[in-house]
Image: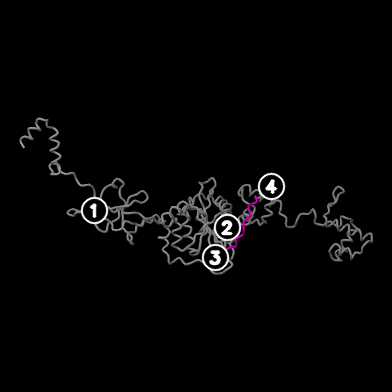
Amino acid sequence: MAERGTLQMSRKERDSQVTLERVKRKEIKLVEAAEVLGISYRQCRRRYSRYKTEGAAGLVHRLRGCYSNRALADETRVLIVRLYREIYDGFGPVLFAEKLAKAHEIKVDHETVRRLLIKEGLWQVTRKRKKRHRSWRQRRAHFGEMVQMDGSHHLWFEERGEMCCLMVMIDDATGIRMSLLATGETTDAAMRLLWMWIERYGVPKSLYTDKKNVFVPSEKDQENARLEGRECSTQFGRACSKLGIEIIRAHSPEAKGRVERSNGVYQDRLVKEMRLKRISNIAEANELLDSGGFDRELNRRFSCQPREKADFHRPAHIYDLPSIFCIQEQRTLSANWTLSFENRIYQIESESANYSPASRKVQVRRYLDGGLHMFYRGSEARFQELNPNKVGEQKKTPAGRRSSARTGTAPPPAPNHPWKTAWSTNQLMKQLTKNQKQDISKKF
């Protein structure tokens, strides 16, 4: 509007003034002016009427300089800024807008919130650095055809606790995800998360992971196994092999970008949600993820329908999951029916008291619940842990029986044993003088 003798006009309004001025000078007709401006004849006639009475000011939009009917009230703006500073400091505009609508019943678009925070100096526009171009890969067509798995180390409890690791699984076709917070990216955590996924959805066809030794053996271990002519796999890989799950290795973080971006969502939303609920331990965090509905809400917002309706998950009732998801190793029995596992000595109950074990191989399983089981010759064996001070003791043979196995060195012979006669004579001859030896020889 006019202010201090000046008038602010847009380029479109300026073009309209020039055209209508030509009509006023009778250079063109009003019908031709409407065609030049791209408006109807009636609209052009109304503009020309205002231009003749008000001049150039009549062509300026009537709402310029006025507040929008949908503009936020000043009290609402002050309340939003105060809530952000006192409670939601560090929240992104999108998440902050969701919290305003859910917790405070203030429905504001996230772009409006973004502009307001930038104006108050509470949010800065970040420009991402350009990355190397990578070819696009289409999502898999079926649910369960490929599931990505990864661990994210982060200060999930901020300053309220130590750094831990969030294990995340996300389906490539649908974006459905599941997570579990653990102390680290360990075999135990990976097995527990996959077990949870199988119980809810079934056994997936394949897993897409990185090259960490939790999922796949290192290149050095693979080379040693190849030279020795044996198979090489991790405990997690062995469990997946029994379930018929193929492990696909990703050669870069960008290759499994779906789960990497999902980690960023958790680092933004989960951290702030636990801050609001004052959660500072792993047990409460896992309760929030599962029964608290955090993962369920993310699936509702960000998942999509697969291209094909067929589900590639297989039923899991045919598998003995506790015996598959365990730490399984092979140990060798000694002659006295003992073996070593996890720096402890265990005694297997022998099948016969008179004989050493027929087979020296024992399969030892440490279940995820902490239970220890040993299998000898295809069946589970009973055992007991020995006192470390009695590790060197040999197994006792019942009285009246003779053990067929060697249990140690033979006892030394008695001094009057025939084997020692020659030795005693030689020692006596060394103590005699030369003349005494000659007298003895003359007598004989």
Residue on which the image places disc 2: 258
- Badge 2 crowding class, 10 Å Cα cut-off, few under 14, some 14 to 19, many 20 or more, is some
Type of amino acid at the residue the image marks with label 3: Phe
Distance in Å between CA atoms under marks 1 and 4: 87 Å
**Mark 3: secondary structure:** loop
Residue on which the image places disc 3: 143
Q: Which residues are magenta?
A: 129-139
Task: Tell me where residue 312 appears, x and y as whole percent.
Answer: 52, 67
Distance in Å between CA atoms under marks 2 and 4: 34 Å
User: Viewed as shown, does residue 276 lie left or right of 32?
Assistant: left
Above or below residue 412? Residue 236 is below
Give the foreground label among 2 and 4.
2
Q: Please tell me which of labels 3 and 1 falls first in the chain.
A: 3
133 within the magenta span: yes
Residue on which the image places disc 1: 405
Distance in Å between CA atoms under marks 1 and 2: 62 Å
**Mark 1: secondary structure:** loop
User: Given the current orientation, which residue lies at the most extreme right position?
Assistant: 26
Distance in Å between CA atoms under marks 2 and 3: 15 Å
Type of amino acid at the residue the image marks with label 4: Glu
Distance in Å between CA atoms under marks 4 and 3: 45 Å
Q: Are marks 4 and 3 in contact (CB under 8 Å)?
A: no
